[in-house]
Amino acid sequence: MPRAFTPKVITANALLEGDVVYLTRDDRWTRDLKEAELLTDEAHADLRLIEAERRVSEVVGAYLAEMKPGPDGPEPTHFREDFRRTGPSNYFHGKQEERA
């Protein structure tokens, strides 16, 4: 029996900066996970991913990442995605400094 579809967001890396980005409902790339479109329908998610993968002049490595709804927008369900949204952990800079 196939697994039930779980909510996801589309994430990738910005082509020039390498930053983690998320696709919004209005087709923008954002660095803020709270602004990402939470996809709850599998067919719609697959279609959105195909569209995102075509934007090769903007991003690389687009994929669907499991999330859960949260009070302020999507929240990661896996440590990998939680780590990706905060960036490298060797010292405080960029996103980590903003969260401190």
Image (spheres, grey):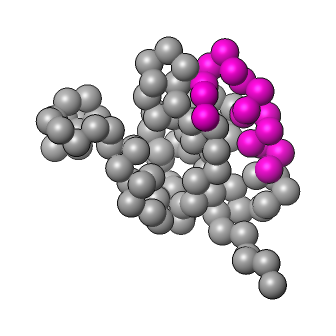
User: Residue 62, how many percent across, how many down?
Assistant: 63, 37
Q: Is residue 6 above or below residue 83?
A: below
**Residue drawn 45% across and 63% down?**
78
| Residue located farthest toward the bottom when viewing the structure as drawn | 1
Residue 23 visible in image: no
User: Residue 24, how many percent across, how many down?
Assistant: 62, 38
**Residue drawn 57% across and 41% down?**
11
**Pick the front one: 33 or 13:** 13
Q: Is residue 38 above or below residue 28?
A: below
Answer with left or right where residue 44 lies relative to residue 92: right
Instruction: Locate residue 38: give its quadrant.
Output: bottom right
Q: Is residue 47 one of those drawn in magenta?
A: yes
**Residue drawn 79% across and 60% down?**
42
Q: Is residue 100 one of those drawn in magenta?
A: no
Instruction: Locate residue 18: give its quadrant.
Output: top left
**Pick the front one: 56 or 32:** 56
- Which image quarter is the N terminus in? bottom right
Q: State which region is magenta.
A: 46-61
**Pick the front one: 1 or 46:** 1
- Total numbered circles: 0
**Residue drawn 39% across and 60% down?**
79
- Which image quarter is the C terminus in? top left
User: Residue 74, how many percent across, how many down?
Assistant: 51, 56
Instruction: Locate residue 55: give its quadrant.
Output: top right
User: Residue 58, how many percent across, how many down?
Assistant: 62, 19
Residue 74 visible in image: yes
